[in-house]
Image (cartoon, helix red, strand yellow):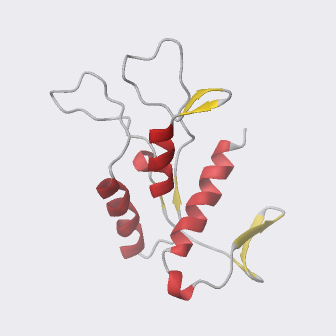
Amino acid sequence: MRFPSFSFITAILLLTSVRAAAFEQFITAKGDQLFEGKEPYRFMSFNIPNLTYTEDDMRFDQLNPFRLPTVYEIDDALATIKQMGGRVARTYVLSVAKTNDLSGTPRHILAPDKLNEEAMVVLDEV
């Protein structure tokens, strides 16, 4: 399953590129270790499960707890990590449509050959 690795590496690259003026190297993997250029890339940070998909929208007027995050929520989460000295955030895997989903449940992957464009735009924002 490639999605967890993809999400993790994507988040690393995106948070690293937040410092666009200071960007010098892509993060690469050699064996089981990450590198920034020739230096080992070490970090401590946080998981942000709601970065790409909100699973706990518990507003009283909502029947479905699932929704896509807003630009504000994404920016706020990443800015918070950065303010705390974090350089990496880990997301969860992309959501996949199921036959028994509640009506209106947003999913990233609708079928093996079909992506949800709205969810992909949100992912681009991350």
- For residue 13, what is the image quadrant? bottom right
Give me the residue at 69% from left, 74% from top: 26
- For residue 103, what is the image quadrant? top left
Q: Nearer the viewer, residue 15 or 34?
A: 15
Q: Is residue 24 left or right of residue 70?
A: right
- For residue 83, what is the image quadrant? bottom left
Residue 68 lies, with reference to residue 24, above or below; the image says: above
Q: Position of residue 122 (x, y in %)?
A: 44, 48
**Residue that lies at the very extreme toward the top in this rendered image:** 100
Residue 14 lies, with reference to residue 116, above or below; the image says: below
Give me the residue at 84% from left, 63% from top: 31
Q: Nearer the viewer, residue 108 or 5?
A: 108
**Residue that lies at the very extreme toward the left in this rendered image:** 60
Q: How many marks?
A: 0
- Judge whether residue 126 can be spotted in this image: no
Q: Is residue 68 left or right of residue 16?
A: left
Give me the residue at 72% from left, 43% from top: 2
Q: Nearer the viewer, residue 105 or 1?
A: 105
Q: Nearer the viewer, residue 83 or 109?
A: 109
Q: Position of residue 120 (x, y in %)?
A: 51, 44
Q: Is residue 91 left or right of residue 71?
A: right
Q: Quadrant of the N terminus?
A: top right
Q: Is residue 26 left or right of residue 56?
A: right
Q: Position of residue 37 (x, y in %)?
A: 74, 82
- Judge whether residue 113 can be spotted in this image: yes
Residue 76 lies, with reference to residue 3, above or below; the image says: below
